[in-house]
Image (tube, rainbow, N blue to C red):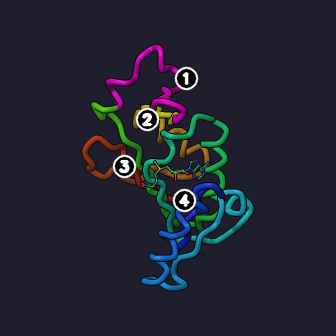
């Protein structure tokens, strides 16, 4: 199993990864998104939970999906999960917070990006990269969609 994230985040969660490794040993490895983008791991499946809606750049979203497609083997699966309709975010989706195709949230010097995807938008985005929609999981206030290559 591979944990893939930005170099900054992998540094931040180094302690957590070590703890998990002490339980799972070599079955858990980590890799930066930069390395992952040029790898071919032939994975059975990839899972991106609560990630796509936090990425403000359309190009970065597409680069991530392209990298996943490169690393998932033929016949493999992809689970994409993004939240929607959360009252916490809905309240903050105001004109003043509008940024690119989403909203900037947070306060002080800390900002996060939030995009409210609709189901069809995720399907067409993911299918651009050679995945086919397979099924929808019933998760409250989340679009949880399974695709296959
Ligand atoms: C809201 S967190 C979700 C983390 C985890 N999947 C979960 O559900 O708890 C979003 C994660 O996406 C990562 N991320 C942001 N942009 C990314 C990119 N271009 N490639 C890979 N990971 C990215 C962030 O560093 C962060 O760890």
Q: Earlier in the sequence, mark 2 or mark 4?
A: 2
Q: Secondary structure at mark 4?
A: loop
What's drawn in magenta, residue-wise?
89-110
Q: Which residue is mark 3?
A: 144
| Closer mark to the observer between disc 2 and disc 3 | 3
Residues at marks 2 and 4, CA–CA distance in whole angstroms: 18 Å
| Closer mark to the observer between disc 2 and disc 1 | 1
The location of residue 140, given as percent across then percent down, is 25, 45
Q: Secondary structure at mark 2?
A: helix
Q: Residue at x 60, y 50 (%)?
A: 65
| Closer mark to the observer between disc 4 and disc 3 | 3
The answer to whether residue 58 is left or right of residue 137 is right
Q: Secondary structure at mark 3?
A: strand
Residues at marks 2 and 3, CA–CA distance in whole angstroms: 12 Å
Q: Earlier in the sequence, mark 4 or mark 3?
A: 3
Q: Nearer the viewer, residue 73 or 18?
A: 18
* 79 versus 109 height, above or below: below
- Which numbered marker is on residue 149? 4
- Which numbered marker is on residue 120? 2
The location of residue 27, given as percent across then percent down, is 51, 82
The location of residue 60, given as percent across then percent down, is 65, 42
Kindly tell me whether mark 4's CB lies below 8 Å from ligand 1: no
- Which numbered marker is on residue 99? 1
């Amino acid at each position: 199993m591979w944990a893939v994230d930005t170099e900054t985040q992998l540094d931040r969660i180094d302690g957590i990864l070590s703890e998990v490794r002490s339980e799972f040993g070599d079955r858990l490895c980590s890799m930066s998104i930069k390395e992952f983008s040029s790898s071919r791991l032939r994975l059975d499946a990839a899972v991106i939970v609560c990630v796509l809606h936090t990425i403000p750049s359309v190009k970065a979203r597409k680069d991530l999906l392209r990298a996943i497609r490169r690393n998932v083997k033929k016949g493999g699966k992809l689970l994409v999960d993004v939240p929607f309709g959360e009252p916490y975010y809905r309240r903050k989706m105001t004109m003043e917070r509008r940024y690119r195709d989403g909203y900037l949230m947070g306060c002080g010097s800390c900002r996060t990006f939030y995009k409210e995807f609709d189901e069809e938008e995720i399907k067409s985005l993911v299918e651009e990269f050679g995945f086919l929609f397979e099924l929808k999981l019933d998760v409250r206030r989340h679009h949880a969609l399974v695709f296959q290559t």
